[in-house]
Amino acid sequence: MFLVLSPLLLLKLFLVPALVALITLAGRRWGPAMAGWISGFPVVAGPALLFIALDQGAAFAAQAAHVTLMAVMANVAFGVTYAWMATRHHWPLCAAAGVLAFALVGWALVSLRPPAWVALLVGLLGLQLAARAMPRVAFVNPGGVASRWELPVRCAAAGVLVATVTWSAAELGPVGSGMLTIFPVMGMVLGVFSHRAWGGQGAIHLLTGMVKGLYAFVVFCFALALALTAMGTPAAFGLALAAALVVQWLTYQRGA
């Protein structure tokens, strides 16, 4: 007896890992800062929220997107904390400190429950401050050979997160789904492997690039939080994706 996989299930299983693989290859080609900037785009959260909308409905996904927007600065807190810890410490301590910062800031922000437009302003202003707060270090590629486990582990971690969020959404509720969606899986996986491959300076450059790329993430979640119940799932995701692409292009132009 063969297990029949639906197209939606196949999409859930392979879309995000494929995107993470492309980001990994981009990092090898153009360096950690570019990989971080690309991963700031809603590569994981976008598909996760889409699957939530398809499984649980537009209203549920709109609430989850609102929570994700509120907690964006928790993701940023992870990046800033990890980056400063990486100036002196090895990756296990950096990752632990970053996750603790994420949990504390995320709990505080979600407890306040600001409206979407306030969360948008907090996110945009917070990203400006976070970019300035990052440590400044020069990046020199040591020329090490990447581990053969790097790419599979990155892809598996992202895939597991999306699967967990979408298949547990009903039990987690909109708040739990939104918080798990914003969990810094990209920062954790990419940051740790960059740290191991290029040292602390590599992780710092990747996380700095990620902060610069999160503007598109913020706009994407804001558009979904407002548009899902008003426009329906296809139109809302089309609008949010278009807005995120425009913002991503603007940040690229500014960075260039």
Image (tube, helix red, strand yellow):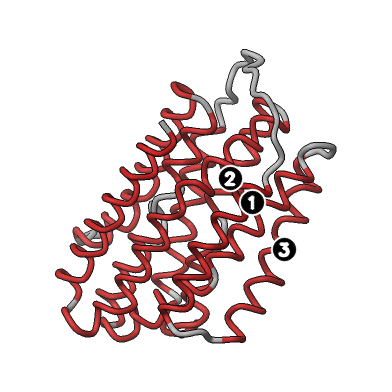
* Mark 3, residue position: 101
In three-dimensional space, the C-alpha distance between marks 1 and 2, rounded to whole angstroms, equals 12 Å
Within 10 Å of disc 1 (Cα), the crowding (few <14, some 14-19, many 20+) is many
Residue 25: quadrant of the picture: top left
Question: Mark 1 belongs to which amino acid?
Answer: Gly
Place of residue 254 in the rendered image (x, y in percent of width and height, measured from the top left): 40, 39
Place of residue 251 in the rendered image (x, y in percent of width and height, measured from the top left): 39, 44
Place of residue 50 in the rendered image (x, y in percent of width and height, measured from the top left): 29, 67
Q: Secondary structure at mark 1?
A: helix
Return the disc, 1 or 3, that comes first in the chain's sequence: 1
Return the disc, 1 or 2, that comes first in the chain's sequence: 1
Name which residue lies at 64% across and 30% down: 202
Numbered badge on residue 159: none
Residue 165: quadrant of the picture: bottom left
Q: Secondary structure at mark 3?
A: helix
Report the mark closest to the observer, 1 or 2.
Answer: 1
Q: Nearer the viewer, residue 39 or 10?
A: 39
